[in-house]
Every structure is written in structure tokens, then in C-alpha cells.
Image (cartoon, rainbow, N blue to C red):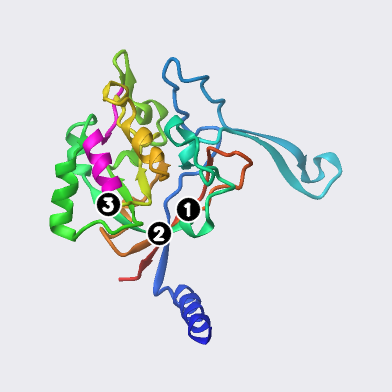
Amino acid sequence: MTNTSELLNQFHKAIKSNEIEIIDLSHTLGPNTPMIKVPEGHGKNPPPVSLEYISNYTDDGGHSRWSTLTTAEHAGTHFDTPSHWTSGQDFVDGNTETIAVNRFLAPACVLDYSDGVKKNPDFILTKNDILKWEDQHGSIESGSWVLFQSGWSDRFNDPDKFLNMDEDGCHSPGPDPDAVKLMIERDVCGFGTETIGTDYGAASKFEPPFPLHYFMHGANKFGLASLTNLDKLPPKGSIIITPPLKIAMGSGSPLRVLALIPKL
């Protein structure tokens, strides 16, 4: 117990002394947050994020400011639980309130393919891309997040560019089925991306459709979408903190994703 207590004290001191840097991987959630367009046959489109004052300091004779927040579970930077997809609906620990809290802290492997995405917004992350990364940085360890650095977060403040939709659908990067299967073989914690959703923009054309959602959540694993600042993380060596709101039967939640990295 003494050694554990000392370890926690050292951790706190390292944060206070900036030996450990905290990086915010989240976008601000507000009325201008781009909202996903739900494919036909998959339900209704979510409402825009809105805030309506309950009290605004002295305007109503009070001393506080607070609001009613209207949003969707999967809005802005958000967490996808296993129960978010039909393949993961039967896990008793698959909702935001039932997931073991120790799963909300995990190391991260950051795969930078932003150059490829810059040349082609329809860039597909393949199994070979992951193997190539492992040849350079070592194997993806069990329990790690795989974070796909694409540079897409630079588009966040322009919803049209962020969604990047035309008459053919959405054009944004993401993994193919074999890449997802490899990540599951590696026993990852989950997959995170800078785009509005974790799947490839045209993933409805894959078999199965939306393979990241289908396979990852079917394996009781997680997703993170609309991340930012991934370019500030090393390929390995960071720890990320991802607790969603504890919503009853929650399939996901907006959240503040934090990364801990050693100060260089």
C-alpha cells in the first residue's frame, strides 16, 4: 500500500511540475458543432446542440447562470459504447453506466496517415498500413487505443468540409474490414478518429456495412470520434482518459478526452 500511495504522490507531483503534460483531445461542444447525417434507414438525424438559459445571473433576480443542454449522445467529441451497434447490444457491461471504470484509462498508439488523407479524402486505412506502422514502432499492445491521425480535425469549424458530403455520400477516411479485424486480433481497447464517426465515410458499401462499428462493438470494444490534437501525441507512450457521462442505458456520450504524455 505504501508503494502504491507513493506512486500516486509521484504522479501528482509530475503533473504539477509539468513533467507530465496534459493534452486536450476534445473539440468545444456548442451550437456550431457539426452533426452527423444519419444514413437512410438508420433513424432520425440528431438535433443541433443548443443551450437555453434556466437562470442568467441577475436577469431574473438570481445569482447563478445555468442552462438546459440539448444534444445527442453521439455529438461532437464523443464515446461509442458496444451497445451503440446491434452487434454489441447484448453485453451487460456495454452501456455507459455498466462499463468497468478501469477501462477508461488506457495507453494509445497513434497512427499518422495524415499525408495520405491530404492527398485523398477517401483514404482507406488498411491492414497493411497498420502492419507497416508496427514494423516502425512495435506491436500494438493488448488494451491500447488505436488513434487514427488524419488531420481531419482542421476541418471541424467548417461543417460542410468536416462532413464532406456530395451526391455520392460522405467522403472521409477510415478503416476497411481487414484493418478492423487486425485491431481486434491485437485486443485493442477501441478505435479513435478525427472524423465525425469512426467508420470510413462510404462504409455502407463495405461488407459488412460499417465494419468498424460492426466488428469493434461486437467484440465489446469502444470508439471515439471527432478527436483533435492527435498531432501532439507520440506514436506510443501516451495514456488517454475517456470516461463518458454515466447515462442510464447510454449508448455513448460527449466527453472531454485527455491525454497524458511525458514532457520532452
Q: Position of residue 221 (x, y in %)?
A: 41, 45
Q: Position of residue 147 (x, y in %)?
A: 32, 49
Q: Residues within 10 Å of mark 1 (few under 14, many from 20)?
A: some
Dot 2: what SS? strand
Quadrant placement of the C terminus: bottom left
- Measuring 17% from the left and 55% from the top, which residue is drawn there? 134
Magenta stretch contains residue 172? yes
Asked whether the beta carbons under mark 2 and mark 1 sit within 8 Å of each other, the answer is: yes
Residue 5 as seen in the image, left or right of residue 39: right
Q: Which residues are magenta?
A: 170-185
Residue 122 as seen in the image, left or right of residue 86: left
Amino acid type indicated by mark 1: Thr
**Could you tell me how far apart the alpha carbons at marks 3 and 1 are, in whole angstroms?**
20 Å
Q: Residues within 10 Å of mark 3 (few under 14, many from 20)?
A: some
Tell me which numbered mark, 3 or 2, is placed earlier along the sequence: 2
Quadrant for residue 41, please give it.
top left
Asked whether the beta carbons under mark 3 and mark 2 sit within 8 Å of each other, the answer is: no
Residue closest to the eye, 93 or 249: 93
Tell me which numbered mark, 3 or 1, is placed earlier along the sequence: 3
**Could you tell me how far apart the alpha carbons at marks 3 and 2 are, in whole angstroms?**
14 Å
Dot 3: what SS? loop
Do we see residue 122 in this rendering?
A: yes
> Which residue in the protein does label 2 denote?
106
Quadrant for residue 210, please give it.
top left
> Which residue in the protein does label 1 denote?
242
Q: Which mark is residue 186?
A: 3
Above or below, 102 relative to 6: above
Q: Residues within 10 Å of mark 2 (few under 14, many from 20)?
A: some
